[in-house]
Image (cartoon, rainbow, N blue to C red):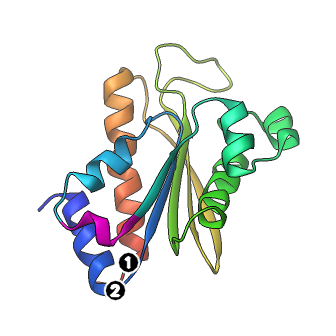
């Protein structure tokens, strides 16, 4: 059974509504969820906020956080996840911001992705360095991990 199918089935059974806030995946998490029949019961909306301006305008991310931490940071991932909840009818959100590649820097290498997961009880974040898997590989690994984070928050 696919991760997305598990997310849809478990969220539907629990009456949980989801929103996504995506940067480096460009809507791939929402696409994975909407590929599953019945997803309209659980996905409220997906925000694709690729640019910093979009993160500020659509999700309400602090320009100061972006300036001091950079777009690829746990702080921005946290604000993205919280913003997705605030600007939707969801009770669970996931956010991703990262460097899919090619490129990166010594400080923020290719394959680094920051995740946020938010509920009405708060936000948790994590950073994963997937490594230089190539752009497609990093994006696919990011989608899989985001779906796994959603599953961790959904009742069995």
- Identified at 19% across, 58% down, the residue is 36
Above or below — where is 74 with respect to 7? Answer: above
Q: Residue furthest left?
A: 1
Question: Mark 2 sits on what residue?
Answer: 14
Q: What's the mark number on residue 124?
A: none
- Identified at 29% across, 55% down, the residue is 33
Is disc 1 surrounded by few (<14), some (14 to 19) or many (20+) residues within 10 Å? some
Closest to the camera, between mark 1 and mark 2, is: 2
Question: Mark 1 sits on what residue?
Answer: 154
Above or below — where is 143 with respect to 16? Answer: above
First to last magenta residue range:
38-43
Q: Is residue 71 visible?
A: no
Q: Is residue 42 magenta?
A: yes
Q: Position of residue 84 (x, y in %)?
A: 60, 58
Secondary structure under tag 1 reads: loop
User: 29 or 40: nearer the eye?
Assistant: 40
């Amino acid at each position: 059974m696919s991760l997305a199918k598990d997310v849809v089935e478990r969220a539907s059974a629990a009456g949980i509504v989801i929103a996504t806030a995506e940067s480096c995946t460009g809507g791939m998490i929402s696409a994975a969820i909407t590929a599953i029949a019945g997803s309209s019961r659980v996905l409220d909306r997906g925000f694709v906020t690729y640019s910093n301006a979009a993160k500020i305008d659509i999700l309400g991310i602090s320009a100061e956080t972006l300036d001091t931490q950079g777009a690829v940071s746990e702080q921005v991932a946290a604000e993205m996840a919280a913003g997705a909840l605030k600007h939707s009818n969801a009770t669970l959100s996931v956010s991703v911001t990262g460097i899919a590649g090619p490129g990166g820097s010594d400080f923020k290498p290719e394959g680094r992705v920051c995740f946020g997961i938010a509920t009405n009880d708060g936000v948790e974040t994590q950073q994963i360095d997937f490594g230089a898997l190539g752009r497609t590989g990093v994006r696919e690994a990011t989608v899989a991990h985001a779906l796994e984070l959603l599953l961790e928050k959904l009742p069995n």
